[in-house]
Image: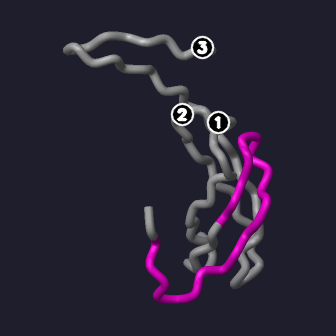
Amino acid sequence: MPVSPRHSGGRLMRFLRSETVVVDFHCRACLGPVTATLRCEGDLRRLTKPPCIPLACPHCGHTNDVTFDARGEVLAVAARRRGEPVWN
């Protein structure tokens, strides 16, 4: 679906694409299976590198840094150390 410009208040605005991506991985702390449904806005194909987001394990609560592509394929999962800040 193409992005079409729209004028609003003298500013050029673009409608963002919204995509749903499902990622499946195993927690690096407890090895429990994790499935997350993510709503991504914008065009993931235009990113210069794959997105990496922090996701908490529903079994143990440990945070995992999950890197994925536009199709939802998990490229890497790294355990975050306890107390390490989450930067958004």
- Tags 2 and 1 in contact by the CB under 8 Å rule? yes
**Picture coordinates of residue 88, whole percent (x, y):** 44, 61
Q: In the rendered structure, find residue 2 and report the number of the disc placed on it.
A: 3
Boundaries of the magenta span = 66-86
Query: Which amino acid type corresponds to the residue marked 2 in the rendered image?
Result: Gly
> How many dots with numbers?
3
Give SS at disc 3.
Answer: loop
**Sequence-first tag of 3 and 2:** 3
Magenta-span inclusion, residue 74: yes
Say which residue appears at 62% left-offset and 60% top-offset.
Answer: 52
> Does 36 sit above or below residue 44?
below
* 64 sits left or right of 5 in the view: right
> Does 71 sit above or below residue 66?
above
Which residue is labeled 1 in the image? Answer: 46
Query: Which amino acid type corresponds to the residue marked 1 in the rendered image?
Result: Arg
Which residue is labeled 2 in the image? Answer: 42
Say which residue appears at 60% left-offset and 32% top-offset.
Answer: 43
| Distance Cα–Cα, label 3 vs label 1 | 14 Å
- Tags 3 and 1 in contact by the CB under 8 Å rule? no
Say which residue appears at 69% left-offset and 84% top-offset.
Answer: 29
Say which residue appears at 44% left-offset and 68% top-offset.
Answer: 87
